[in-house]
Image (cartoon, rainbow, N blue to C red):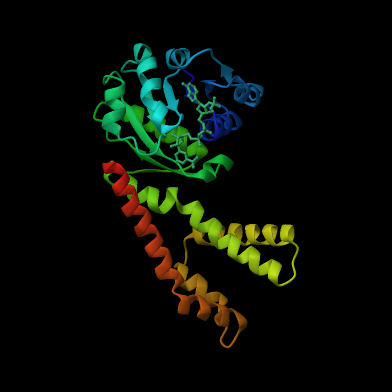
Amino acid sequence: MTLTIGCIGCGNMGGAMLSGLARHGGYDLCGYNRSPERMQPLEQQGVHVLKSPLAVAQAADLVLVAVKPYQVEAVLREVRPALNRDKVVVSIAAGIRRQRLAAFTDNACPVVRCMPNTPALVGKGLFALCLEDPTLTAAHKQVVRDVFAVLGLCIDMPESKFTAFSALIGAGPAYVFAMMQGLAQAGVTLGFQHAEAHAMVAALFDGCAAMAASGTKHFMQLRDDVCSPAGLTIAGVNVLDRAGLTGLLVSAVLAADARGRDMEKE
Ligand SMILES: NC(=O)c1ccc[n+]([C@@H]2O[C@H](COP(=O)([O-])OP(=O)(O)OC[C@H]3O[C@@H](n4cnc5c(N)ncnc54)[C@H](OP(=O)(O)O)[C@@H]3O)[C@@H](O)[C@H]2O)c1
């Protein structure tokens, strides 16, 4: 039987997830968004546009909740009458713990907490999945993993590591884009056009990411492979080492992690 996946809140993340699943095919897809115009491009991709969050929860086997964190409680309470043990709710809301999600549904169905990062918007997301709800069956877990594998790389993660994951991978695009901005700026300084520098730097990161993902060499080895003795690269790399770039990145992630832990207490 074809799995029905419904999404409540089809903005940036929800829309990107439905769109990615529609491109892949093989699922019945439905969704509801407060502003109807956001549903138009999704409808053209074959997503059934429903009239309310409750209608989505009634129709779907897997209910994705992709509204802003402060809207999650109201949405889950609204859809509560449609939930039962045969359905699974997946929330991607930042900072809302699994037990709170379960409480919002009166423990009516298994709940999965998921943390994506923004490359999900282009089908290259990294998704942490907390599959610790004891009411999830092995079959439920497999369905959730299979669905998110369509959208990017997904990894099982205990909830105790979600803040660390957020500090490293959720926030990660900001660190990467900061480095990209610096290199593009250097390109412009050397006389390249802005668009040219932007495109070249994007291609540079894409190529490096592919090399890193091939996984045959450590990052330090990949770095050293570029540095010929007495060459120009080692001259540049020495500047980064003197400035402590590696240590700075570690400090940035630890600061984000500390802030995330403070936010959990607020
Ligand atoms: N973006 C990220 O980098 C990122 C990363 C990790 C996690 N997340 C999580 O992803 C979630 C969504 O973020 P986003 O960036 O996609 O936000 P977004 O673009 O604002 O999307 C949220 C959507 O939910 C809709 N909505 C609000 N209340 C609704 C309701 N009662 N019923 C149906 N639709 C409703 C909004 O409709 P309107 O168009 O009417 O406002 C909006 O289109 C958040 O919980 C966030 O924590 C985001």
Q: Relative to residue 58, is residue 248 depicted above or below?
A: below
Q: Relative to residue 8, is residue 129 depicted above or below?
A: below
Q: Quadrant of residue 44?
A: top right
On the question of residue 91 being in view, the answer is: no
Viewer-closest of 244 and 159: 244
Total numbered circles: 0
Q: Relative to residue 79, is residue 126 depicted above or below?
A: below
Residue at the left extreme of this rendering: 134
Viewer-closest of 20 and 121: 121
Residue at the bottom extreme of this rendering: 230
Viewer-closest of 49 and 150: 49
Residue at the (38%, 15%) spot, across then down: 78
Q: Quadrant of residue 102?
A: top left
Horizontal side of residue 26 vs 89, given as left or right: right
State the quadrant of the C terminus: top left
On the question of residue 205 being in view, the answer is: yes
Could you say where residue 216 lies in the image, as x and y percent from the top left?
A: 47, 64
Horizontal side of residue 83 vs 193, given as left or right: left
Horizontal side of residue 259 vs 238, given as left or right: left
Residue at the (34%, 59%) spot, across then down: 254
Residue at the (35%, 11%) spot, across then down: 81
Horizontal side of residue 252 vs 183, given as left or right: left
Could you say where residue 256 lies in the image, as x and y percent from the top left?
A: 37, 54
Residue at the (31%, 25%) spot, across then down: 110
Could you say where residue 127 lies in the image, as x and y percent from the top left?
A: 43, 42
Could you say where residue 14 lies in the image, as x and y percent from the top left?
A: 51, 31
